[in-house]
Amino acid sequence: MSKRLLKTGLAVAITATSGHGFASGFALNEQSISGMGTSFAGRSSSAEDASTVFGNPAGMARLKREEVYVGAAVIHAQSDISRASANAGPATLSGSNDGDMVPSTGVPMGYYVKPLDDKVAFGLGIYVPFGLMTDYESNFQGRYHADKSYVRVITVQPTLSYRFNDKLSVGFGPTFNHIEGELTSSVLNPTSLGSNDGKVKVKGDDTAVGFNLGVLYEFTPGTRAGITYHSRVKYELEGDTRVSGHGALAAIAGKYDANLGLTTPESVDMSITHQLTDALTLYAGSTWTRWSRFKEIRVENDSAALPVIVEEQNWHDTWAHAVGLSYRLNPQWTLRTGIAVDQSPTNNVDRSARVPSGDRTIFSVGAGWSPNQDMTIDVAYSYLQEESVDVNQQSSTRGDYRARYKNSAHGLGASLSYRF
């Protein structure tokens, strides 16, 4: 029975795909602070600073001067867990449900754009498109279904754009992506339910290549539309699995080579930017993400004691929609606001304590200050509120865990743009 428990525990340990950032699944939206102020409503059409390298590489053709952009966002998430219960057969499993499992997380970004002539521009971006960090308390009641998770993707994107005429421009850039993760889970000890837990710790990393492609069309000097395609990226994480435990679990304690296939999904971002007056600009956009690629977790271990492990996920594709406004008070100050709605890719049947997310609404405000023509400082604040969702996990080897989750998050960002 101990081997069976460990197999299931390991599968749970690597199901680390929940995110408490400001995008669905484990995607992050924080690649632009100016965009954050409008809830990213005009991400593929605004092209107002060097962060367009990510938002729409075609937008680099609109930038007339060499520009450096550096910024960071901090995300602080909170979860309220209620109606919690856990059991293994007739035995009740005790534990706490603090809900304080997401530490404050920083998301950095940096971009550089240089016009090469009137038609061609070169850009370089470094950003974090996917990531999460969750760490439940050691005595969490659902610890056999979720414990600690850390996953991060860092992307480097060299980019070129070309402007065909006053209206149409395109951009393309390969992405070089490095993923790393460290994930742990508790394992129920069959000889002492609820005590002397075992532990499974999985570490791995990989580097893979994708691409971003964008098109920008300017109908008039005050109205433009853009579409950006971010490709899927297929990883084969290689690392090790460490198992520890007492009693029946001691027989399989040790370190094993492991590998995990993971594909981050492609997405299509579409938006329009329309200048209503000399001071007021409207942004509206939608993003489709192909989360249905994430159907299962499959782990292969270099050990007869740990064969292939499969756990169903069955995520579905999602849509996010946003609308925003910016108001130019004077040449120095611009104010921004926006609201977005974002679907969760999880379903009611397979939702786990690692992925306790529901559909979300995001409200944002921001401001840009340009003390001169060479420099702009942007700040933004976002508040995220999710609908309440139920987790109902049942397992003959890990016990059952039921709870209701209600999540929220605060985001604060700042960036500096300097033009030469």
Image (spheres, grey):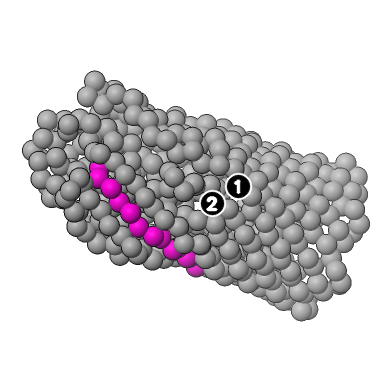
Identified by mark 2, the residue type is Ser
Q: Position of residue 1 (x, y in %)?
A: 17, 31
Up-down: is 29 above or below 349?
Answer: below
> From where the camera sits, is residue 416 visible?
no
- Which amino acid, mark 1? Thr
Residue that appears at 24% across and 20% down: 304
Q: Earlier in the sequence, mark 2 or mark 1?
A: 1
Q: Main secondary structure of the magenta part?
A: strand
Question: What residue did someone put label 1 on?
Answer: 318
For marks 2 and 1, give the CA distance.
Answer: 7 Å
Of helix, strand and loop, which one carries label 2?
Answer: loop
In the image, which disc is placed on residue 344?
2
Q: Secondary structure at mark 1?
A: strand
Tell me if label 2 and label 1 are in contact, CB under 8 Å. Answer: yes
Residue ID at (88%, 41%)? 164
Q: Determine the image quadrant of residue 210.
A: top right
Q: Which region of the structure is painted magenta? A: 398-410
Residue 267, how many percent across, how many down?
64, 42
Residue 345 or 88: which is nearer the viewer? 88
Q: Quadrant of residue 70?
A: bottom right
408 left or right of 302 in image: right
Question: Badge 2: how crowded within 10 Å, few (<14), some, or many (20+)?
Answer: many
Q: Position of residue 253 (x, y in %)?
A: 16, 33
Residue 217 highlighted magenta (yes or no): no
Q: Residue at x 84, y 48 (%)?
A: 217
User: Whole-percent x and y of residue 418?
Assistant: 67, 62
- Residue at x 61%, y 69% (from the top left corner): 364
What residue occupies the far bottom of the structure in this picture?
Answer: 329
Give the residue furthest to the top.
304
Q: Is residue 252 above or below residue 320?
A: above
Few, some or many C-alpha atoms within 10 Å of disc 1 (few <14, some 14-19, many ≥20)?
Answer: many
